[in-house]
Image: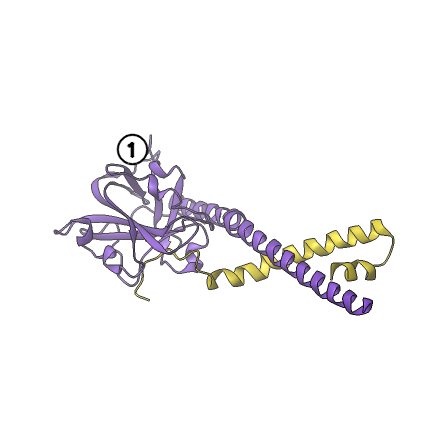
Amino acid sequence: MYGWIWRHLPGNAWVRALISLVLALAVVYVLFQYVFPWAEPLLPFNDVTVDGQ
Amino acid sequence: MARARNRIAGVISVFGELLITAGVIMGLFVVYSLWWTNVLADREADKQGDEVRDHWASAAPGALDTRDGIGFLHVPAMKNGEVLVKKGTDPKTLNNGVAGYYTAPVKSALPSARQGNFSLAAHRDGHGAKFHNIHKLKNGDSIVFETKDTWYVYKVYKTLPETSKYNVDVLQPVPKESGKTKPGRYVTLTTCTPVYTSDYRYVVWGELERTEKVDNARTPPAELR
């Protein structure tokens, strides 16, 4: 999978490495900004109140 | 034969990469939960706290204003500075690194009320983790609540290290579970326990010892000096 991505990136090894890094950072950004905030309330780690439900 | 083996190897390697990816994502989620949410929440809480203090400084003395937050909680034993207290305990409020006073299932009394239970909740981990050190509180420790014109000094008299999340009785105006039978001016802190999970709730009760008027220099009471 990652090998396939690597082979389809343009340029020489340095350019590919740079693009890979940017892609990885973009993925981390999307995770922190959108995916994790969405997932967090669905997981049972951080309920702090007592309630009847 | 060789081609079939290659295909199998390919499938297995993609499967392995997916597993590694899942592991990395879970690791990032831990980083997000325990670090990044604190960064965001502390930033937001500082901003909101400054707004409340500015508002106090500019407005006329007297009336309690619940809109931006009713005051600041100081618990020296928790070593976490001041915690802004706002109305409500919904996640959206608490995720900003503040403590919230209960509006449901049992409505909290305000500290200024002649009697009742001032019940609060805040995060144990992430989102500011304002009650992270709740287990450090022992009987006799001070819980000080600062409003615009009054310091309320409470003393811890009972801790309940583990209770069910359905145990709403801990919030009652007279918290019988803490051993009290008469109306008084109580404070109740609730958060989740054990750390990093929310299987149970941790509860700390305090009773009002005295109040002090805020002076012009906002000199803190002896407990905070």
Chain B painted colour: purple
Badge 1 local density, few (<14 within 10 Å), some, or many (20+)? Answer: few
Residue at (78% x, 51% y) in the render: A18
Q: Single out the residue that lies furthest toward the front.
A: B1
In the rendering, at what x and y percent does residue B103 appear? 31, 61
Which quadrant is the N terminus of chain B positioned in? bottom right
Badge 1 element: helix
Q: Amino acid at mark 1?
A: Glu
Of B147 and B33, which appears nearest the observer? B33
Which quadrant is the C terminus of chain B positioned in? top left
For residue B33, above or below residue B90: above
In the rendering, at what x and y percent does residue A33 appear? 59, 58
Of B146 and B168, which appears nearest the observer? B168
- Side (left or right) of B140 relative to B148: left
| Residue B181 in sight here | yes
- Side (left or right) of A29 relative to B219: right
In the rendering, at what x and y percent does residue B211 appear? 23, 40
| Residue B66 in sight here | no
Residue at (55% x, 54% y) in the render: B29
In the rendering, at what x and y percent does residue B162 appear? 30, 51
Of B58 and B143, which appears nearest the observer? B143
Q: Single out the residue that lies furthest toward the right.
A: A12
Of B214 and B134, which appears nearest the observer? B134
Q: How is the image coloured?
A: by chain
Q: Where on the picture, by quarter, is residue B4?
A: bottom right
* Chain at numbered mark 1: B
Residue at (82% x, 60% y) in the render: A7
Residue at (28% x, 63% y) in the render: B105
* Residue placed under numbered mark 1 in the picture: B223
The chain coloured yellow in the image: A
